Image (spheres, rainbow, N blue to C red):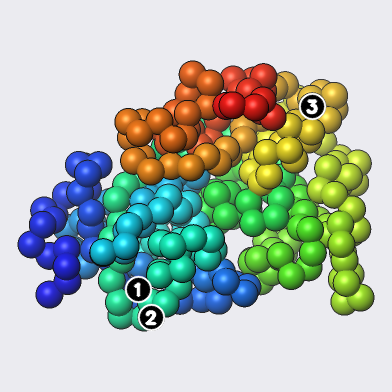
Amino acid sequence: MTPFSQAIAPTASNPYLIHPATIVEKIGAADGIDTYRLRFVDEQVRRSYRFSAGQFNMVYLFGVGEVAISIVSDPDEPDYLDHTIRVAGRVTSAISQLQIGEVLGIRGPFGQGWPLSEAQGRDLVIVTGGLGCAPVVGAIEYIFRRRNEYGAVKILHGVKTPHDLLYRERFDTWRRYPDTEVLLTSDQPDKAWHDHVGVVTELFELVSIDAARTMVFMCGPEIMMRLGAPILIDRGIPATSIYVSLERHMECGIGLCGHCQMGPYFLCKDGPVMRYDRVARLLGSEGV
């Protein structure tokens, strides 16, 4: 019997309920970073659970606590949930010790996801930096499973060092799709690095953009989005066609605790994906 068994009803509608999920696969991505493939224990929860690409779950370890983690799997995958978790504190350190067959708790999903329906028929420029690519991975997988519903796709990803590059196999797979460009860059390359050198915003000059039909998804360090979005706006892309995924410390997931407040917004429910023109003045401002 899991520690959750007696306390949890088989429903995904109550945001306070924690649903047990078994680790069915643990995939090493880099030192201190693993992708956990989870399967809900309760079949009814498994059938009813739905999420949008860009949303997150609160991942709970019994007796330790919970942490907000982006969902990186395709929203239409019916059986499994993937979460890429980096060791960054007490809860994630304890989770990193778990093995296949052990149980985590899932509470969620929470927040607003990427506007994938609005993006249908349009070109997409997807800009990510460092470990910040995780919130958009599910959206990319969703797009490529429905490749004929979207226009040209350009994925621009920057890392500080090659060691920080996650999902190398996914990038290699994505670049094989038609009408797709994948450009990688590192600003501190090693001798084995064969891609571009520099920061990710320098890649903007290497791709052609039809501004009138392009939508932009950006996630990564906030300074990257704060500096990168205006460059794309100068290329003619409206601020209303640029979406960013923002990160703050999230503890409740439902806008009660206030830890994730950014100006008038609570990112756990108003975000984490938000239209750039709504938050542009808040990016980089101290105290928000």
28 is higher (above) or lower (below) than 195: below
Residue 1: x %, y % from top left:
12, 75
Residue 132: x %, y % from top left:
63, 51
Which residue lies at the image location 44% right of the left edge and 35% below the top edge?
259
Judged from the image, the secondary structure of the residue bearing numbered disc 1 is strand
Whether label 1 touches label 2, CB < 8 Å: yes
Given residues 180 and 134, the one toward you in this image is 134
Question: Crowdedness of circle 2 by 10 Å Cα count: few (<14), some, many (20+)?
Answer: some
Give the CA separation, mark 1 to mark 3: 42 Å
The residue that mark 3 highlights is 230
Question: Crowdedness of circle 1 by 10 Å Cα count: few (<14), some, many (20+)?
Answer: many
Given residues 209 and 218, the one toward you in this image is 218
The residue that mark 1 highlights is 23
Relative to 286, is 21 on the left or the right?
left
Location of the C terminus (image quadrant): top right
Judged from the image, the secondary structure of the residue bearing numbered disc 3 is helix
Upstream in sequence: badge 1 or badge 3? 1
Upstream in sequence: badge 1 or badge 2? 1
Give the CA separation, mark 1 to mark 2: 7 Å
Judged from the image, the secondary structure of the residue bearing numbered disc 2 is loop
54 is higher (above) or lower (below) than 64: above
Upstream in sequence: badge 2 or badge 3? 2
- Looking at numbered disc 2 in the image, what kind of residue is underneath it? Gln
Question: Crowdedness of circle 3 by 10 Å Cα count: few (<14), some, many (20+)?
Answer: some
